Image (spheres, grey):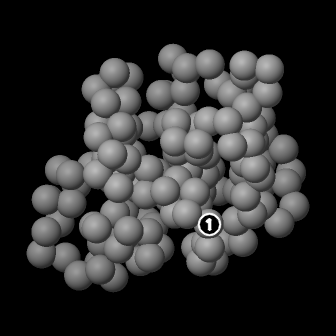
Amino acid sequence: MKDIKSRVDKLVRRYKTRNPFEMIKGMNVVLVYYPLVDIRGFYQYFKRNNIIYIDETLSDPDKKFVLAHELGHMILHKKSNAIFMDTRTCMKTSGYELEADMFAMHLLVSDEDIEDCKDYTLEQLSRAFGYQQKLIELRLK
C-alpha cells in the first residue's frame, strides 16, 4: 500500500496537479462519457490505448472520483482488462478495486489536506472532503 502512495506522489510531481481531469491531458488516455448501466466507470487497455469510460449521468464530484479510481486501475493494473462492477456501495471484494480506491483517495486528498483537518472526526472528514467514511478510512491507513 505504501507503493500506491509513492506512485501517486510521483504522478502529482510530474503533472503538477491532483486533478485527474488535468492529469490525463498529459497522458495517453481517451476519456469516454456514456450512459452506463449498473457501473460508474471502467478502464480498458486496447491496442496500446488507455480508455476510461465514465457514466455520463454522474454528478461532477462523482465523475472526478470515478476518473481517479479508473486512473488507479490504469497505473496499477494496466493490462488486467477486467471490467469491475461498482455498485455505489463502496463494498468491494476485489483487491484491485481496493487498490484503485486507495489510489483515488491518495490522489484526491493530499497529506496536507489531512494535516489541516487532523482534529476532525471521521464523520467530519467525510463531510469536509465529500467522500464516504469508508473511503476516508482507507485514505487514513
- The quadrant of the picture occupied by the N terminus is bottom left
Nearer-the-camera pick, 134 or 1: 1
Q: Which residue is mark 1?
A: 94
Local SS, label 1: loop
Relative height, residue 18 to residue 23 (above, below): below
x and y, in percent, of residue 141 in the image: 28, 67
Look at the image and tell me whether residue 103 can be seen: yes
Relative height, residue 87 to residue 14 (above, below): below
Residue at x 75%, y 63% (from the top left corner): 85
Residue at x 33%, y 45% (from the top left corner): 3
Nearer-the-camera pick, 116 or 15: 15
- Which of the 4 image quarters holds residue 120? bottom left
x and y, in percent, of residue 129 in the image: 36, 63
x and y, in percent, of residue 88 in the image: 66, 71
Left or right: residue 64 compared with residue 131: right
CA neighbours of label 1 inside 10 A, class few (<14), some (14 to 19), many (20+): few
Left or right: residue 108 compared with residue 82: left
Left or right: residue 115 compared with residue 8: left
Look at the image and tell me whether residue 51 can be seen: no
Residue at x 29%, y 40% (from the top left corner): 6
Residue at x 80%, y 20% (from the top left corner): 47
For badge 1, the amino acid type reads Ser
- Which of the 4 image quarters holds residue 51? top right
- Which of the 4 image quarters holds residue 57? bottom right
Number of numbered discs overlaid on the protein picture? 1
Relative height, residue 57 to residue 136 (above, below): above
